[in-house]
Every structure is written in structure tokens, then in C-alpha cells.
Amino acid sequence: MPELLRLQSDFAAALRQRDQSGNMQRWLAGDAGLADRRLAIYRGNMVAAADKALSAAYPVIRQVVGDEFFHGLAREYQRGTPSASGDLNDFGAAFDAFLARFEHVQSMPWLPDLARLEWAAHRAYGAADAPDWDAATLGAVDPEQQSAIRFQWSPGLAVIESPYPIVRVWTIHQPGYAGEFSVDWDVPETALVARDGFVVRVTGCGPADAAFLAASLAGQPLGDAAESALRLHPDFDLGALLARAIPARLACGFTL
């Protein structure tokens, strides 16, 4: 088993970095140049798979930076962040952290937050369907127990806060967008990401609503989540938020 582990480690290193190919010579018989060219085929296929997986999760970033540069990002990302899952849908989970430290995109400081938004949309698309529930059951909760309500939110629902206009950038890069393309980079935005049928919706979310949703998604009961939102935003209106969230199937149940 130790020999197999060394072989696998050497092979993985040779795929990620060409200068590590020499370690494979002890495992491969025949012409070294031929072996290196064959390893290059594997290496190229791996980069192509990384490019395809990241393109599926980050189509907006691909549009923003261009195909050639995005291919380079995919190559560098897979070198430093090899896949830890058999499902390539999981491959881009750390792409935002990679972009935050990658020197060649530092002139676009909003790119990591855009990546967080796109990853949330990617995960929401593959999330389970929201279960049906009768919202009228909320009215049967004893008033003294209402603060203990813990809402169950639609699978894949996410709140992404940013000091940059990430919702605007995401919106203008969607297929069929026909509006104007100006972006005010001084406007911070919070994105609310949720799946609606087979479509992922990304909308702007006010800071007060975002504070409540973030607290509730973290598991806080209604009373505590509302207090958290009110401390930060005295104008928070829980009734108005629920009046929008329940018909939109963002909330899909509750427990006490």
C-alpha cells in the first residue's frame, strides 16, 4: 500500500506541475520523452475539465475576464486547489478565496464577492425543491410562543453581502439583458439568491432584511433574529418581509 500511495502522489504532482514529471520516471518504463508527452495529455485533459467545471459555476466571471484569461485562472486554480470530490459540481467552492489572493486580478477587488454570488447561485440551482406548507398554520401559534418560531427557508437560499454592486454586475451579464450597462461602483449591494422552479433568481436585498435573514438562516429563532436586525436597523419591518417571503416560497415551514 505505501508503494501505491507514492505512485498516486507522484502522478498527482506530475499532473498539477509539469516540473514534477521527473518523479514519474521510476514508475514508467521506456522513452522518458514519450512518457512526458503522454503525461501532458492527461494534464491538458485535467485543465480542460477544470475550465469546464468553473465555467458552469462562474459564467459571469468568464464574461468579465474573457475566455483566454479565464482558462488561465482555471489552470492556476486547479494547480493549487485539486478537486477533493468525485463530483465536479463541487470543484469551484474555494474560487472566491483563490481570486482574493491571485495577484493578476487585484485591480478588480469586487471579483471575489461576485464569485461568492455566483457560487451561491450555482448551489441554489442544484438544491432540493422547497416543500409545500400551509402558511396559515403560522396563525395557530400561541402569541407567547411566536418568538420561538424557527423558519425553514427554501433550500439554496443565500444572502451575499458586499461593499460592491455585485447584483448589478450579475444582472447586466444575464442572457437576454436589454437595459443599459452602467455600473456605479460606489453602491454596496446585498444579494438574495433563491431558486424559483428551474430558474435561480438574484435580487437586491435591503440591509435590514439581510440582517434578519442571515440570523434566521444561522438558526436563530424569530425573536432573536428580529432583535438582531432591529439593533442594526431600527426601521426593520418583519411583517413586510414575511409578506414578500412567504408568497415567493422563500419560507417553506417552521418549527417551535
Image (cartoon, rainbow, N blue to C red):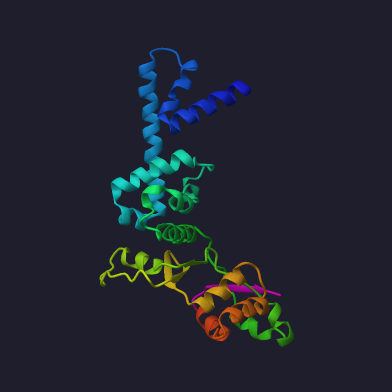
Q: Nearer the viewer, residue 185 or 71?
A: 185
Left or right placement of residue 181 versus residue 2 in this view: left
Q: Position of residue 91 (x, y in %)?
A: 48, 47
**In the depicted view, which residue is nearer to us: 106 or 222?**
106
Q: Residue at x 46, y 57 (%)?
A: 119
Quadrant of the image for the N terminus?
top right
Residue at image location 67% in from the left, 79% down from the top:
223
Residue furthest to the top: 30
Q: Left or right: where does residue 36 sit relative to residue 219?
A: left
Q: Which quarter of the image is occupied by the C terminus?
A: bottom right
Q: Is residue 253 magenta?
A: yes
Residue at screen point 45% across, 38% down:
79
Report x, y in % for residue 137.
Answer: 64, 81
Note whether 212 is above or below 104 in the view shown.
below
Reply above or below: 34 against 251.
above
Q: Find residue 62 and report its horizontal and vertical position in percent.
A: 34, 53
In the image, farthest residue toward the right: 144
Q: Quadrant of residue 40?
A: top left
Tell me if residue 76 comes above or below residue 12 in the rendering.
below
Q: Nearer the viewer, residue 64 or 242?
A: 64
Where does the magenta region start and end? Answer: 248-256
Place of residue 114 in the rendered image (x, y in percent of width and height, measured from the top left)? 41, 60
- On whether residue 182 falls in the magenta region, the answer is no
